[in-house]
Image (spheres, coloured by chain):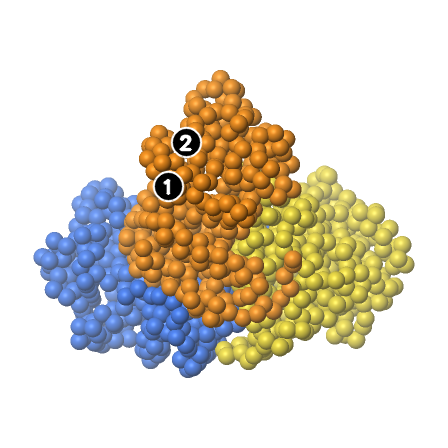
Chain colours: A orange, B blue, C yellow
Amino acid sequence: MDFKGSHILSIEQFERADIERIFEVADRMEPYALRKRITRVLDGAILGNMFFEPSTRTRVSFGSAFNLLGGAVRETTGFESSAIAKGESLYDTARVLSGYSDVICMRHPQAGSVAEFAAASRVPVMNGGDGPNEHPTQALLDLYTIRKEVASKGRSMDELRIAMIGDLKYGRTVHSLCKLLKVYNNVTVTLISPRELQMPEELVEGLREVGHQVVVTDQLEGSINSDIVYSTRIQEERFGSKEEADLYRGKFRLNQQIYTKYCEPNTVIMHPLPRDSRAEANELDNDLNENPNLAIFRQADNGVLVRMALFALVLDVVDGVDKYSSDVNWYRPE
Amino acid sequence: MDFKGSHILSIEQFERADIERIFEVADRMEPYALRKRITRVLDGAILGNMFFEPSTRTRVSFGSAFNLLGGAVRETTGFESSAIAKGESLYDTARVLSGYSDVICMRHPQAGSVAEFAAASRVPVMNGGDGPNEHPTQALLDLYTIRKEVASKGRSMDELRIAMIGDLKYGRTVHSLCKLLKVYNNVTVTLISPRELQMPEELVEGLREVGHQVVVTDQLEGSINSDIVYSTRIQEERFGSKEEADLYRGKFRLNQQIYTKYCEPNTVIMHPLPRDSRAEANELDNDLNENPNLAIFRQADNGVLVRMALFALVLDVVDGVDKYSSDVNWYRPE
Amino acid sequence: MDFKGSHILSIEQFERADIERIFEVADRMEPYALRKRITRVLDGAILGNMFFEPSTRTRVSFGSAFNLLGGAVRETTGFESSAIAKGESLYDTARVLSGYSDVICMRHPQAGSVAEFAAASRVPVMNGGDGPNEHPTQALLDLYTIRKEVASKGRSMDELRIAMIGDLKYGRTVHSLCKLLKVYNNVTVTLISPRELQMPEELVEGLREVGHQVVVTDQLEGSINSDIVYSTRIQEERFGSKEEADLYRGKFRLNQQIYTKYCEPNTVIMHPLPRDSRAEANELDNDLNENPNLAIFRQADNGVLVRMALFALVLDVVDGVDKYSSDVNWYRPE
């Protein structure tokens, strides 16, 4: 695809070459995200960071990525707008707001809303999450993280072995991952969930159609000795009955003891965050925090790189990033 | 008037020469708003964008205008401040907040509040809407749009023919327009509204006193073949009785069919936005969206130009805008 | 202490030399805060201004201080984050958010939360108020103001005479002041409050231990003829009984008449703000607004200087501030 001026709405719009282009640019953003250099390539540009649903981390990640490239950010942080409440159409909102910035990131609770907005916008729009539908930059940062983690262990994306744990029926991030993994070869995907929360059949079929090996199970034992374990939360209310919930309580939890018992020594642990750290959550325990294979915070860091890359590609400034760079004046830990 | 360091509180403070000065500077801002050039003239300056009442579009428009001139924006987006809730006076708030920025834009639900705030502020204050009272930058962008639209058709503001439709009794924007139009000559103003929602008599008198021709009617037929049609919403609850509301239901609506039947081929359609696009609204239909004379989104774009002009005038940097300008690095559609 | 890369969590971490270093740097920030010069030393740096509890003035003061040094600001303005609501730990929040900025200011309703957050953060963290616990930048700006006000009258901090009025039991600011005053010599502290709202005994003891003279009283008469009077609000609901409240009603109020009667001609009036200006508040009357010794708004201005100084020290750019400075382009009143 030609990124210049494009909307970023769905992972479906990317082919393998596009994904590799994004990741290659993301790699080049690292010195700027780590503050080894600064760049002012987008000095004068404005991001409209339009979050019509609250989200601190995704909103700030987009905004910081734009600041790191030298641009300014104008923002909305929830349904403060009386305009939309007063019956304004997404068409009108897009026509107006796209006059205020050079690119827009948008989150909105309604599926399809960001694409509808983009159709009327005069500047490129990035989907920051449209309700239950898509959150393409999360999917890309997950895949970028997998690629980086396995590369650091000398392995490649082809032949990848990945296990996904938890609520695979409703989890937006694991659905996106299943779609994205189809561009690689010979992937082994192990899907571990309660019977009531299994991965939708069409996604499983999609993986098999491209020749991937898929295992469906409800047991951690023998299933998580893979390159990557991607853990997600199970909300109790998703179960059809209390009996079903009781049957599975605590069985999809990961902690250091379970990790040592069932994972390979280098299995990388991922999670879409936020992680519920309360005792009753039975999700991903705090005793893993010092495990060097816990990659959940590297995922968040990679989100900045991927978002910088998308801004640079869509605004066509990839080659200018280094050209407009300079030294950092201030103290930076590490 | 001398704009340097002045507060912008009310349209009453402007004479014709002042308005023309603002519009002349607004014209010069266009290359920057269209990102043909960038300017850093306000690099280092801070706008305090103090919205004590939510508003996405006006708030972001002010903020983007300031960013486009190179400045930074600090912001508040609603009555988050516990200070005001705790009984702090506008005097105290102004004395404190005016130490944090070089210029302040303020919206506040209470009529007169912005002027009271400005009296204690140590930096220039712009009224971003003080409840039912004034919203001077909206009035200026409306007038600037009228001037630009009629000029593009080879006509001037003197001899203008304008029709206003809808709730003329409570509509703040049409009141401001009536006041501003008094600086021009030989204007014909047609006021179309239900009997219960007619333009206040003193405003009609004001127009007549300067020699303008005023027609008051409750019929679109024969009334909207003018240079400009300015449409506003009628809220059903404004009527004194259900019978009155029923009598007028749908009679002040504009759509393509009505436009073709009653308007001139080049009649320009305006609206203060947001427009209610729901079917039952009977306001300004979506089937006008492709009509090139629908100027409602050009109004919003012009708001950025007018606000840039006011910042440049009040901070006395009009001549510096071009001096501190440079090329745009990034891709911009169109 | 070595400021470079340090968290700023509590006034307990400062010795006299540290405080004097902060104040010396704050003095050097004045030309920039007054817009006689601008500096871009932090061009490219990002502040994460994370206010998990609303606060307009402290939040905007931190943000403006960072903008004045040339940096950009990403912000959150309340508990919008569903992440924390979903059970995310402060450890996780810190690990994620500290990847988005170079320094973080944080306000949070829970005592100890900012220190817990800082322990997991990869960048320096400044406490912007952690509930009832600490608000160290407020304490520093209070002390900086006292020092500047008495210096302008030819006096020094050693031998200082200060009176504190109001709710001394729960007032966070007066507690911090008592701790900070211990680094000076021969201070006379007069503590004026209702019996039920007296300064905690350990704080009084702390002052006495370093040789300061402490007077405890419930009468203004004869008590406020000092260098500084620091007034705070008494909330009626703090009293144990209505009788106690009635006994003291209006007795800790300061207005021009009381000032003239009991204060010295040059006694400086301070207050942590916001001040309740409603008639029934009986706190610090508006008729003092023209009194040149009312320093409450100078306190707010000094907050910007102190916060700029802390940013410059923690990010180690003190010497770069002048180096990266330039002229101001725009008009500035005064």
> Looking at the picture, how far across and down is residue A275, in whole percent?
55, 38
Along the line of sight, the residue nearer the viewer: C84 or B308: C84
Q: Secondary structure at mark 2?
A: strand
Up-down: is B227 above or below B199? below
Q: Quadrant of the C terminus of chain A?
A: bottom right
Q: Which amino acid type is marked by label 2?
A: Val
Number of marks drawn: 2
Q: Secondary structure at mark 1?
A: helix
Q: Quadrant of the N terminus of chain A?
A: bottom left
Residue drawn at x 32%, y 67% is B302
Along the line of sight, the residue nearer the viewer: B75 or C214: B75
Residue B34 visible at all: yes
Q: Name the chain under label 1.
A: A
> Residue A182: which disc?
1
Query: Residue tagged by mark 2?
Result: A214
Task: Locate residue C44 relative to residue A182 in the image: left or right.
Answer: right
